[in-house]
Amino acid sequence: MSELLTAAQMRAIEQAAIESGEVTGLELMERAGQGVVEAIFEEWPDLEGSGNRAVVLCGPGNNGGDGFVVARLLHERHWQVEVFLYGDSEKLPPDAKVNYAKWLAHGTVNSYVDEGEDAFWLDPSTYRENTVLVDALFGTGLTRPVESFNAFGWVTQVSEWKLAEEQRFQSFPAPRVVSVDIPSGICADSGMRLAGETPVPHLEEISADLTVSFHSKKLGHVLGAGPALCGKVVVADIGLSKDPVAPRRALAELHNLACPGARLGRVVAHESSFQSLPLFLPKRNARHKFDYGHALVVSGGPARTGAARLSARGALRIGAGLVTVGSPRAALAENAAHLTAIMLRQIDGATELAELLEDKRINALCLGPGLGRSSDKQALVVAALQAKRATVLDADALTMFGENPQVLFDLLHDKCLLSPHGGEFANLFPDIAAKLREPVAKGPAYSKVDATREAAMRAGCVVLFKGADTVIADPLGRCSVNSAHFKRSAPWLATAGSGDVLAGFITGLLARGLSPMQAAETGAWLHVECALQFGPGLIAEDLPEQIPDVFRRLGV
């Protein structure tokens, strides 16, 4: 688990450190450049020797200053280094100007021309050796669109080279692209492309092989288009205190959120590890099955029962003591034919559901997968919410309220959890989704974190907004991102029923006593781990069956 920062938060941390006398801006820039160089050699050990080539593209701000440090350090390792500056050297910030002057003691600086006959362009005939292209044009401080800036011709060309290399159309390697802090043109707070009203041609194809961030990842590294464009993200330690008091105060003041009530909330990323798992998941000796809860999953009618069974299987595998499928009489035989350890109970209508829920041992509910959207199904959801149990609403239980979402919001309570995908989110929160879809005219852009937090505040409960960048937020502004990118990329989860299993995982964890926020974070993280455990060819039925191996690997 690691904290994700906005650009404003990062500036606040740096400024507080400088003002306290802990470090100077020049020292931070030197450490940043050193971090980039170390990351290059860590990622590509074959480049350790001399004689390699670097093209360093420096921008008009401190990101460009980092680029000058990288150029100097590579030159000291006997690399051939070309440096290009976009903008006027006289207008560079003070620290960047110092490093510009230091570089001039080693080499020249070419003007970066972005259009016309003199526009910067790589000549393949002169770059046949291993080449690193360092993107230090615009970093996390970028707030303006790049639609008028033709900086991406070289990246488009490199992308074409890489495609040709993959298809064996050329015999020499394409340059390796390294971005300093974040690929140029990406909003560090949202992962959105700052392209204004007119998208930059081929921008969707631009990506770095390696992105080197500093101190901590930024939201844009794990949200939106950011992960696809960043490639592998490495965080370089530049010697800043991890939790200083003054920056923490500044973070609260500067946090860029659309919903004021959530301004104090941190955003954390759950990626390669989940530190709370050992506390949540082991089962102890001398316990009874009811000590681990009883989950109820409500099924749809005939020919619509599979989704509920997937959820129920997920709840049982993740450790709920008992799981029952509540089924209409017409679908009892269909469900019974597929269930063994999972119990079955007839539920025809809201009255029978309310009667069943008089059993207080049933402590977690799941409604929506395969449920249907008729008025009698809506009555089931109402009855479930009136019982005030921990409740997961997914799929049909969300879309059935699309014409009047406020009806649902008035019934929700703090034990509820909504788990929409993009379409379901837009159905419930159309105005929020519209803001998220708007072209980004300037940064910092409205992000998926902002949208999920605003939705959670409106709903009054935890919202899990699904995707490869799953965002989870509660009404108090607490927020986390379950990032399934790079080494945790699990594209096999794009399969029918995958979300139903996730709903079951979360329901089972609620039955075991986790809070909605804990259950959502843990369930989403395990969902990806199960997909990675199985690999290609995954179908939804495989996901619950990976839990035992995942638990053993984690030492649960």
Image (cartoon, rainbow, N blue to C red):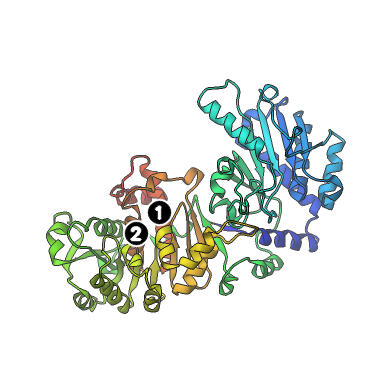
Q: Amino acid at mark 1?
A: Leu
- Three-letter amino acid code at the position of disc 2: Phe
**For this rendering, which residue is in front, 235 or 446?**
446
- Find the distance from the CA under tag 2 to the CA under tag 1: 8 Å
Q: What's the residue at 38%, 73% (across, down)?
A: 404
* Residue at horizontal 58 percent and vertical 59 percent from the top: 3
Question: Picture coordinates of residue 211 (x, y %)?
Answer: 62, 44
**Residue 288 in view (yes/no):** no
Mark sitting on residue 94: none
The percent coordinates of residue 256 (x first, y second) are 63, 65
In the displayed structure, does residue 23 sit left or right of residue 155?
A: right
Residue at disc 1, secondary structure: helix
Query: Looking at the image, do the residues carrying marks 2 and 1 touch, with CB atoms under 8 Å apart?
Result: yes
Residue behind mark 2:
505
Tag shown at residue 526: 1
Left or right: 425 as drawn, with respect to 216:
left
